[in-house]
Amino acid sequence: QNYPNIITLCYVTDNLMFSSALKKLHKLCQLQIGGFAYYNLSYSSQDYLQALIRYLSNSLKILSLLNIYDYYYENLNCFLQDFDIESVKLEVFILSFNVELDLLPNLRKFIEKAKYLRYIKIVRSENYNVEKQKSSEREIINLCQ
């Protein structure tokens, strides 16, 4: 399967949206909030990604993916060309720490069915620590000011 071996998730504030220009998207892909998010994403023999995400606010969105190869890149390119991407917001609720997320197949389905979806939402797990999320949100807001 043509899964990328390295994927970097990018977290941005909720007022940012997709740009229809691929080079602008690539630039936004590199936007990272250091210290409050780190990434250790790889796929296992079951093609699952282990997403290690540290208490991020649900007001943050996963904007896009960096290092998209093969047909993923082609699908994303078609998606950018076919739609007014600036009016589409890809929303992913941040999950709790150490959660297995079947990420690539879900994103592939989103890209394939984008004509019928305005956003994609992945609900956080039930054991998510709300107090730590609120504390982390304040830290991230302070960092962005």
Image: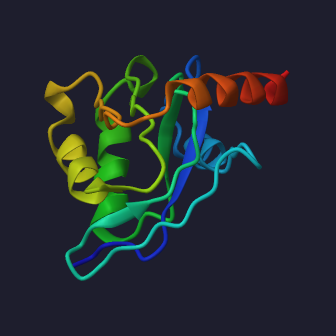
Q: In which quarter of the image is the C terminus?
A: top right
36 versus 136 height, above or below: below
Q: Residue sitting at 17 percent across and 29 percent down? A: 115
43 versus 104 height, above or below: below
Q: Is residue 50 something one can see in this rendering?
A: yes
Q: In which quarter of the image is residue 125?
A: top left
Q: Which percent across, then down, holds residue 106?
A: 22, 49
Q: Which percent across, then down, holds residue 64?
A: 47, 45
Q: Which percent across, then down, holds residue 85?
A: 40, 27
Tag count = 0
Residue found at the very far bottom of the displayed protein: 45
Q: Which percent across, then down, holds residue 119?
A: 30, 25
Q: Which of 145 and 25 is in front in this view?
A: 145
Q: Residue sitting at 50 percent across and 25 percent down? A: 130
Q: In which quarter of the image is the N terminus?
A: bottom left
Q: Is residue 59 left or right of residue 139?
A: left
Q: Residue sitting at 53 percent across and 22 percent down? A: 59
